[in-house]
Amino acid sequence: MMASSYNAKEEDGHHSGAANHGGAGAVKSKKPDNTAFKQQRLPAWQPILTAGTVLPAFFVIGLIFIPIGIGLYVSSNNIKEFEVDYTGVDISSPCHPCAKNFSWNATTPCPCSVHFTLEQPFESNVFMYYGLSNFYQNHRRYVKSRDDSQLNGDRSALTNPSKECEPYRTSEGLPIAPCGAIANSLFNDTLKLYYIDSNGTRNEIPLVKKGIAWWTDKHVKFRNPGGNDNLTLAFKGTSKPVNWRKPVYELDPNDDDNNGFTNEDFIVWMRTAALPTFRKLYRIIQKKSGSTPTLPSGQYVLDITYNYPVLSFDGRKRMILSTISWMGGKNPFLGIAYITVGSICFFLGVVLLIIHHKYDTRNNSADIPN
């Protein structure tokens, strides 16, 4: 029988011969180092799932989620909402002539009016939205087609926009401001709302156009080019987007704080939607003093300046009037989701409890039978 000697260095991959000679032909071991991390000896915690821990968890989740879901669902249902589709697809629609004959190349706007009735009064502040359907603002090339440096007032980006804006980067040899497909497709319908009183008189509803954009967008992300208070001179040497009828410095010439890149209608549009059917805030109808409802029940007229064609991509347009609650606008999905998850957890808890009591055959006695 031959005796063999144990060498720890050899086990770790350090051969004595190679170590003594230090030759270049030494074989390097692929064995991981003898550490707690590489040898997987780190302390760990593994939960042991038992009926005493799983069942209470299911019941607690169910008892918490169901009341929250009910509260969210009731709060969402208390929000009043009214929609008016003015696409003009139907022949009977007042906007049908505009929808059929209007195009991006049209030089004159097409007016139309839609009558509707509010069955219930709207209290508190009322938010007016415009909604579009089958409009994919989430397309990758569309989302990238913008120049944030230009929108932030960078002078160099104003005269030399990003290549991401192609094919809406230049027009007639001049840089486009604002450049890109998002800005080029700016929603430009004009909406006015009138209340018809008992005498048949049209009373215009005041619509507030300030305060509809995010504060960070208005004061941080979007800025006009500096160096000149006159926006006409600030944007000199640039061209308007292809589908626009007027340059960016004429979006609201009566209010310098709402003109150019800081125009709130423009800022709202530039925040792209995630889904093809979306709505964007257009105006705010502020609450009246006293107990008078903001929008009383009765007859209304929506005057539309039809500038935005949508039939070319099978789209739809609509105007939405809505109130809000502490959780935002009308959205019953969140409440339904909470109720569903809570109900499933509670049901599973009951089922597992029955199975546990019916099939638990463990011997609770410490004595082992012969």
Image: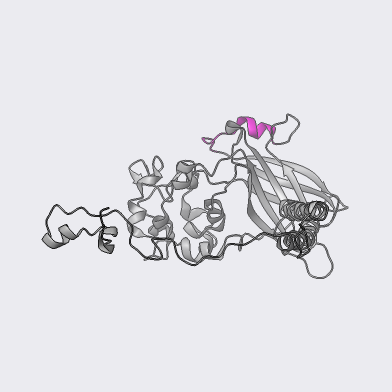
Quick one: 156 or 48, which is closer to the camera?
48
Q: In the image, is 187 to the left or to the right of 52?
A: left
Question: Does 344 lie within the magenta span?
Answer: no
Q: Position of residue 273 (x, y in %)?
A: 57, 48
Quick one: 320 or 343, which is closer to the camera?
343
Q: Residue furthest bottom?
A: 290
Q: Is residue 329 above or below residue 136?
A: below
Q: Does the image show residue 87?
A: yes
Quick one: 191 or 233, which is closer to the camera?
191
Colour scheme in use = one colour
Q: Residue furthest right?
A: 198
Q: Residue furthest front?
A: 1
Q: Is residue 350 above or below residue 215?
A: above
Q: Position of residue 206 (x, y in %)?
A: 71, 59
Q: Does the image show residue 80?
A: no
Answer with the quarter of the image where residue 35 lies: bottom left
Answer with the quarter of the image where residue 31 lies: bottom left
Q: In the image, is 26 to the left or to the right of 139?
A: left
Question: Does 106 lie within the magenta span?
Answer: yes
Quick one: 353 or 320, which is closer to the camera?
353
Q: Position of residue 270 (x, y in %)?
A: 52, 52
Q: Residue at x 65, y 46 (%)?
A: 131
Q: Position of residue 366 (x, y in %)?
A: 75, 65
Q: Is residue 281 above or below residue 257?
A: above
Task: Report the span colored magenta.
Answer: 95-107
Total labels: the figure holds: 0
* Quadrant of the drawing holding the C terminus: bottom right
